């Protein structure tokens, strides 16, 4: 049996506006993506690319002009499916008069949690996002980053099968970012598929295994990060490996001394070199560390976007 | 159904937490009480004046309470507060019903406070007993908030944020003037006949009103409200939410 993708869109398009006052351009143009179960999926694109639009379509907040979308195997307009999704909106805003725990309790009630469950789960998520100390403070007095944390807390409240986060890293301090990345990883380990948009490409590369790039409403590429990014070679880190270095040096592309007896060597990625390094690692366990070096997502992102923009500009110039 | 109560409870609590609500109730009661001093200007008809004022202001309070819907719903939609709730397993129709019930509860609380306060003021100033008919007429005012909440909900989901309260207020106003402004289609057609809920003279002249009338009017109000809510639900479901 083929596994049902967690998110599947088919030629999803969106043109904003009401009745006769429609925008001229499509904000989302024929988007078809699939997000497999268990993935951490980074959804990238410059400002105005259509990321938030896609996410809102997936949450049934806005309606598609054409095309269709399925989430967890059900059409997006099915309200029952939303109980299994955690969602963090673009700029989380909550009623300022409520305290953090009151708000989370309302959310838990809407998710049909029993009283006993709520009593256990609300302090739990507050602890996860490190907001226990502010549990009884009014949300109106919270900073941008604190609201973001509460937003994350309400998203993971129901232990969702799918987490959809719109720019979750925005507004967080460096600690907050670390913690959010930790939360995403933890949730993913528990079996949650995570789909999020972000502009912080280094973080995306760090935690995602899949990515898609969107530009001006169109999908430029999508897939496993390993398939998208070209390999830049394999690097080997040697601890206490002065003797090994001598053997390996002739084939290495690059060699750097990292400490008194520590070396880092980079090799071209070929089946041969891969095999050899793997053997070496097994032979000198503990002394040798092999890491694949990827092209940075940032370079890849710029390349793709500029290709797309340049191509268009070129066409216009010709005309 | 439980979700509807959660939204209603939340909407109601959030407004009743505002101190300004109680301040306005106090202002109304002071105004009502001050009517007692108008004996000379009103040629000793200050009893009627006081009663009329208490009922009129209670009606205004009901209108203002339900009108808050036309601010509250668009604001929650614009700020994205509603999106958080709607993306839980809450249908859009349930959200609207929750809001309507919550705000209706607010209107009930505010009107009851004013009614009780006004009655105490009346009873301490005048000997004529009016208890039962007074209760009935105040009940009608509270019931009149039912069709009004549905009108406000309709305006809140159908019109731009700036226009919604103005259109809602005009609709309520026209509905209250059905007998005077005889515009066919509009009065009693599209708009409800709110005159049916306005029976002030009965208190002032102590003429009894049968319970059957109140029941009939209530049913009329509920039927109108359900119809308008269905319509609002359809429009709301078709809308894009920010
Ligand atoms: N409510 C709206 N009404 C009209 N146009 C809109 C609306 N929301 C978004 N758009 C348009 O849709 C396009 C895509 O916007 P979207 O918010 O999806 O971008 P984004 O990728 O999330 O950008 P950012 O990185 O800045 O958040 C933009 O051109 C924007 O002008
Ligand atoms: Mg966005």
Image (tube, coloured by chain):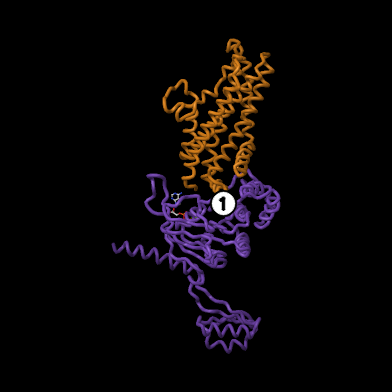
Which residue occupies 57% across, 66% down? A207
**Chain letter, colour purple:** A
Above or below for A78 versus A178: above
Q: Is mark 1 within 8 Å of ligand 1?
A: no
Query: Which quadrant holds residue A184?
Result: bottom right
Q: Which of A264 and A155 is in front in this view?
A: A155
Dot 1 surroundings within 10 Å: few (below 14), some, or many (20 or more)?
A: some
The location of residue A234, given as percent across then percent down, is 54, 79
The reply, left or right, for residue B62 in relation to residue B234 is right
Seen as rendered, the residue at the extreme left is A319
Point out the image quarter for the C terminus of chain A. Answer: bottom left
Which residue occupies 63% across, 57% down? A159
Residue A196: in sight, yes or no?
yes
Query: Which quadrant holds residue A195?
Result: bottom right
Secondary structure beneath label 1:
helix
Seen as rendered, the residue at the extreme top is B43
Which chain is mark 1 on? Answer: A
Which residue occupies 63% across, 36% down? B16
The location of residue A9, given as percent across then percent down, is 47, 59
Q: Which of A142 and A158 is in front in this view?
A: A158
Above or below for B32 versus B66: above
What is the display colour for chain B? orange
Above or below for A185 versus B30: below
Q: Mark 1 points at which residue?
A: A80
The reply, left or right, for residue B136 in relation to residue A50 is right
Residue B170: in sight, yes or no?
no
The location of residue B111, given as percent across then percent down, is 61, 28
The location of residue A177, given as percent across then percent down, is 60, 61
Which residue occupies 57% across, 32% down? B65
Q: Nearer the viewer, residue A155 or A68?
A: A68
């Amino acid at each position: 049996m083929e596994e049902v993708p967690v998110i599947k869109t088919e030629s999803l398009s969106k043109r904003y506006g009401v009745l006769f006052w429609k925008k001229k351009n499509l904000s989302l143009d024929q988007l078809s993506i699939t997000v497999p179960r268990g993935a951490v999926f980074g959804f990238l694109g410059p400002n105005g690319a259509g990321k938030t639009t896609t996410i809102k379509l997936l949450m049934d907040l806005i309606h598609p002009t054409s095309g269709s979308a399925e989430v967890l195997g059900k059409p997006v307009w099915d309200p029952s499916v939303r109980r299994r999704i955690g969602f963090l909106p673009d700029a989380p805003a909550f009623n300022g008069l409520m305290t953090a725990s009151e708000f989370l309790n309302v959310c838990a009630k809407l998710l049909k949690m029993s009283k006993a469950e709520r009593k256990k789960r609300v302090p739990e998520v507050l602890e996860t996002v490190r907001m226990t100390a502010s549990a009884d403070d009014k949300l109106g007095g919270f900073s941008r980053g604190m609201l973001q944390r509460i937003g994350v807390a309400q998203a993971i409240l129901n232990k969702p099968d799918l987490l959809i986060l719109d720019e979750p890293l925005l507004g967080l301090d460096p600690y907050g970012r670390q913690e959010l990345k930790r939360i995403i990883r933890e949730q993913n380990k528990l079996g949650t598929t995570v789909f999020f948009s972000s502009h912080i490409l280094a973080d995306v590369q760090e935690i995602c295994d899949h990515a898609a790039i969107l530009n001006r409403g169109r999908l430029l590429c999508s897939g496993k990060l390993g398939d998208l990014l070209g390999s830049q070679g394999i690097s080997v880190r040697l601890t206490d490996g002065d003797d090994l270095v001598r053997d390996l040096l002739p084939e290495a592309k690059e060699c750097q001394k990292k400490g008194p007896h520590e070396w880092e060597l980079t090799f071209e990625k070929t089946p041969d070199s891969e095999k050899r390094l793997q053997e070496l690692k097994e032979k000198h366990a503990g002394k040798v560390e092999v890491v694949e070096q990827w092209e940075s997502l940032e370079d890849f992102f710029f390349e793709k976007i500029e290709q797309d923009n340049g191509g268009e500009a070129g066409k216009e110039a010709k005309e | 159904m439980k979700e509807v109560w959660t939204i209603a409870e939340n909407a109601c609590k959030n407004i009743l937490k505002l101190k300004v609500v109680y301040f306005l109730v106090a202002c109304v009661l002071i105004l009502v009480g001050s009517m007692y001093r108008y004996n000379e200007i009103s040629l000793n008809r200050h009893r009627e004046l006081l009663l009329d004022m208490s009922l009129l202001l209670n009606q205004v309070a009901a209108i203002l309470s339900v009108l808050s819907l036309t601010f509250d719903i668009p604001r929650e939609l614009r700020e994205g507060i509603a999106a958080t709730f709607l993306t839980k397993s809450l249908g859009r129709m349930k959200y609207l019903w929750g809001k309507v019930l919550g705000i209706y509860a607010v209107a009930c609380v505010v009107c009851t406070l004013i009614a009780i306060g006004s009655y105490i003021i009346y009873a301490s100033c005048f000997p004529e007993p009016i208890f039962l008919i007074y209760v009935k007429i105040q009940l009608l005012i509270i019931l009149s908030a039912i069709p009004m909440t549905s009108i406000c909900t309709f305006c809140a989901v159908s019109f731009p944020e700036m226009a919604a309260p103005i259109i809602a207020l005009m609709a309520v106003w026209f509905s209250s003037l059905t007998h005077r402004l005889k515009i066919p289609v509009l009065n009693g057609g599209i708009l409800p006949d709110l005159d049916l809920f306005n029976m002030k003279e009965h208190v002032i002249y102590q003429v009894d009103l049968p319970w059957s009338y109140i029941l009939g009017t209530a049913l009329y109000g509920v039927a109108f409200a359900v119809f308008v809510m269905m319509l609002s639900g359809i429009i709301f479901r078709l809308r894009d939410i920010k």
